[in-house]
Amino acid sequence: MASKPYDPFLTQFKIVIAGGFGAGKTTLVGSISEIEPLTTEEIITAASIDTDDLAGIEGKTTTTVALDFGRRTFPHQQMVLYLFGTPGQERFWFMWDDLCRGTLGAVVLADTRRLQDSFGPIDFFERRGLPFVVAVNEFEGAHRYPESKLRTALRLGAAVPLLLCDAREPQSVREVLITLVKYVIDRSAAAGTRPSTTVPHRSAL
């Protein structure tokens, strides 16, 4: 995808993409980013295999060890989204607080093959009062569940948006991001506040 020029007059938001190990966060950021995404993927070593649970994702060969970063402009909505993908393994969660500073909201990317990996990210954002949506990444061969069962399993309130998506498809990811922004705006309007904006500086990387 060709890089688009930076427009300082658009509203800028920082979005965090979180989820369990192997849920597709790096793929999501890469599929929607209009710039060459920054990734910090490393080969899974024998030492990592002893530490990280690969059940259900045995074919995974790389893992994010710091963050993923991408940018996407939505000209019709007059905004730019800066996307920060978190590492999925629990041993890297100490970085999440720093990555979430100045964040408008978050996407929790869920994998039905390892749905329990979504509990930690959901709890993390709920405890901090950070608005989020849950996007179920529909991997090929993974079992499909109705929304009601997914909500029950994830203990999601009725107000939290739950979507199905394909992290490989830009249009699908676009719908997830637009849904998050609309959710935050509606929630802020109901509370009588305004969504915060942030301009990520290079030092934030």
Image: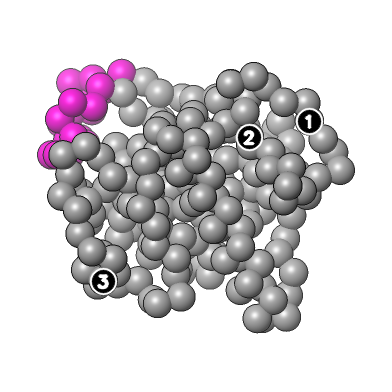
Dot 3: element: helix
Please rate how many residues cluster around mark 3, counting C-alpha atoms within 10 Å: few if below 14, some from 14 to 19, many from 20.
Answer: few
Q: Which residue is mark 3?
A: 148
Q: Which residues are magenta?
A: 43-61
Q: CA distance from mark 1 to mark 2?
A: 10 Å
Q: Quadrant of residue 64?
A: top left
Q: Which residue is mark 2?
A: 71
Circle nearer the N terminus (2, 3): 2
The numbered dot on residue 6 is 1
Q: As drawn, is 136 to the left or to the right of 180?
A: left
Q: Please identify the quadrant where the C terminus is shown.
A: top right
- Give me the residue at 86% from left, 43% from top: 9
Estimate the x, y position of residue 188 in percent, counting from the top left.
Answer: 66, 73
Q: Is residue 58 magenta?
A: yes
Badge nearest the viewer, 3 or 1 = 3
Q: Against 21, is 110 above or below?
A: below
Estimate the x, y position of residue 102 in percent, counting from the top left.
Answer: 66, 53
Please rate how many residues cluster around mark 2, counting C-alpha atoms within 10 Å: few if below 14, some from 14 to 19, many from 20.
Answer: many
Q: Against 151, is 169 above or below?
A: above
Q: As drawn, is 164 to the left or to the right of 179?
A: left
